[in-house]
Image: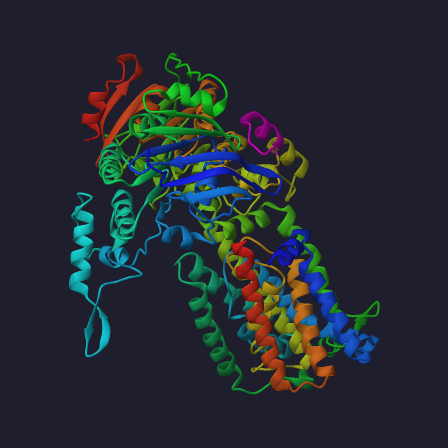
Amino acid sequence: MNAPAASARGVSKHFGATQALDNVDFDVLPGEVHALVGENGAGKSTLVRILAGVHRPDRGDIAVAGEVCAFNGPRDAIAAGIITIPQELRLVPGLSIAENLTLGDPPLRRVLGLAMIDRARMRREAGEQLAQLDFTPDTRLRVDRLSFAERQLVAIAKALRRRCRVLILDEPTAALETREVERLFAVLARMKSRGTAIVYVSHRLDEVVALADRCTVLRDGKVAATSRRGAFKVADLVEAMTGRAASKVDAVVSAPGAVVLEDVTQRPDAIRLRAHEVTGLAGLLGSGASAVLRRLFGIGGETIELRRDGALTRIAGPAAAVRAGIGFVPDERRLGLVMNMSVRDNILLPSLDRLARGGRLDRAAGDRLVGELIGLLDIRPRAMHARASALSGGNQQKVILAKWLAREVGVLLLDEPTQGIDVAAKAQIHALIGDFSKRGGGVLVRSSDLAELALICDGILAVHKGRITDRLQRSDGFDEKRLHAAIGG
Amino acid sequence: MRPLKRLNLFGQGPLIALLALCFIISLLTGRFLSPLNLTNILVQSSIMAVIAIGMTFVIIGGGFDLSVGSTVALAGCVAAMAMVQFGLVAGVLAGIGAGVAVGLVNGVIVASLGINPFITTLGTMVLVRGIVFLITGGAPVGDERLPAIFLAFGTARFLGIHYLVWVPAVLLIVLSWVMAATPYGRRIYATGGSREAAYLSGVPVERVIASTYMWCGGLAGLAGVMLAARLQSGQPTAGEFYELTAIAAVVLGGASLHGGEGTLYNSIIGVFIMVVLGNGLNLLNVDSYWQRVAIGVVIVAAAAADRLRSRS
């Protein structure tokens, strides 16, 4: 067995009173994909940041190719060949692909003794680099014109330009569609065959099972399990992560309820939501499924007409939609929360007018409501005055749902409500959605995860190029082949 | 950076800075703590405090207003002109109304047309100053033709304290309550903290933003009327650089230029820091040119502190 490309031995790290990592051992071999999984707050990010030189461990050592290193910052880690591809890619949007790839060490030529950027060579080198990833765009294109998946490939290509011993990917597939995930996996397989060590952090356990040679599960800052390929299944991972056996959310089939929301502006594509029903919107990235959802909340400038609980209502913007008892959970959490405000103020934001008594807010009633919701949704920490930015992704998502439960809306529009959150929080949010609909609410939920839609929805609308192309019912059984065909995937 | 953070944890960083500044100056000169000088500081702070309260509305709402200095001059001149013609009440209302009008223009352009507040208010700053010179012909307005009660307002006291000082004190109490305890106040914080998130929560963000500029303009108008009372006339050149002092004071008070954070109380502390600094340098006979340099340093330092805070 050869020496690990990178390893952590007995690493501990605390932030304030929180022990983020406690005596953790972790290593990754050349030519190996080592997955790192765990619930939010289990210590994955901390471990990855220590490997990347962002944090220094309190105790323990980091070694690269068998030699102990003390990183003084990310620069040292990069020099040692440890490259991180974070969730939010660090590319300059206004520069071209070629410029981004060669940023920092552009190819130069001398003109009259002056060093000038050799643009032809820059483009050629960038093109060659990307061709290795089976990606052949016009390298003069600005990066902000690319899709997320394409930008990710540019970021990986940039990492490959440097000596890359260890590639760390943090939730690389959170924003990718199925086909893009496949392409990414092909790229990773090729890098692996060339001897690059890959650390793969993900919430998508089925991917981990498909991709990883080894998998380490972190729980509460400790290693809960490390196992080899073939020795782990999704259910095992969930159990190791949460410390309990995985339970399935029961799908409930019930009689159709009253129509709670009907889009009367767009006749042919009319969306109709019923009480006690969860309706799914399936569509690839760029299919317009997200726009269908946003339109119903009055976003996009046009005024639409809805029939809400039978009454005709004009929706000119989100304020009107909220007054009509409609809540919207956007696909990005920073759009759902005012990050520098407290959990309490965020939860009460849509309900301020309801809590006003003679012009002033009824503080006690607000606190009571927030306290109840924090308990009901199991939001942690149980501190209503904590800043929203201090919460983990799953808890932030619960706070966004709590906003609409506080307002007592009758219809929820959810855009990727479980994107990038851990399995436990995901299950809790699924249960909340089910509970909301059981109490007579109507739900429209978009997700790029078809398995998730099949799990929680009573009916699914397939969207392709902004139009509804098919409607499937749970009673018919969700036919995945038919669904794929309808969304054009 | 760490002590700075800890001070902010208590929320009293600006107050501690102010007390430290007072302590240092009082060690250097015995005249600082004299009753006459302290009264002087209060009166000098009063007009800037009214402007800073309005500026705090705009900055918490995520905006910026450079036009307040010109608005002060416009309001003073309009108030003096109206007062000579129609009497005291009409004059005061005309002055404040002129300020609200400037704020409305700023607010509609920034909120509805989505134009950068820096450019918008830079434009209205120059534009309003031009209007002031046009309507006055560049000459002061009023003098002894102003109502006697108005002229007395600039110097008279109530319970031993100048009327000029009572104005921001009452505004501070009432408007702090509005910010903290009414739905409207919380919507300003939410809009400044994240315009998109507030919008998607049903907050009418355009109206909220426009209203903050109207507060700022209206209070700058009130400050202009107060200044006219103090100067015993409407001065077309009044209020120059007031916008910069007001913004610096608000940022010194801990409000974030990114929006969503700050309190009226701390902004007033920021005003005191600016005024005490100027007053102290005067008492110490520091060259007035150097005073400008010192105030410039403080403004940059305040912006740097804002940056450090938002990073931590």
Q: How many marks?
A: 0
Q: Is residue B268 magenta?
A: no
Measuring from the top left, give residue A126's x and y in whole percent.
20, 54
Left or right: A154 with respect to B194? left
Q: Quadrant of the N terminus of chain A?
A: top left
Question: Which residues lie in the magenta part?
Answer: A371-382
Measuring from the top left, give residue B277's x and y in whole percent.
68, 75
Q: Nearer the viewer, residue B185 or B25?
A: B25
Question: Residue at (69%, 59%) from the top-left corner?
Answer: B172
Left or right: A63 with respect to A106? right
Instruction: Note whether residue B91 is visible.
Output: no
Instruction: Note whether residue A231 is visible.
Output: yes
Image position of A437 with respect to A321: above or below: above
Tell me the colour scheme of the image: rainbow
Question: Residue at (59%, 38%) from the top-left corner?
Answer: A18
Residue A135 location, quadrant: top left
Q: Quadrant of the C terminus of chain A?
A: top left
Residue lying farthest to the front in this orientation: A1
Left or right: B52 with respect to B61? right
Q: Nearer the viewer, residue A204 or A315?
A: A204
Measuring from the top left, give residue A131's x and y in whole percent.
16, 47
Q: Nearer the viewer, residue A29 or A452?
A: A29
Image position of B7 with respect to A409: above or below: below
Image position of A126 with respect to A222: above or below: below
Image position of B96 with respect to A328: above or below: below
Q: Nearer the viewer, residue B291 or B4?
A: B4
Question: Residue at (38%, 28%) from the top-left corner?
Answer: A215
Residue B55 location, quadrant: bottom right
Question: Residue at (64%, 55%) from the top-left corner?
Answer: B8
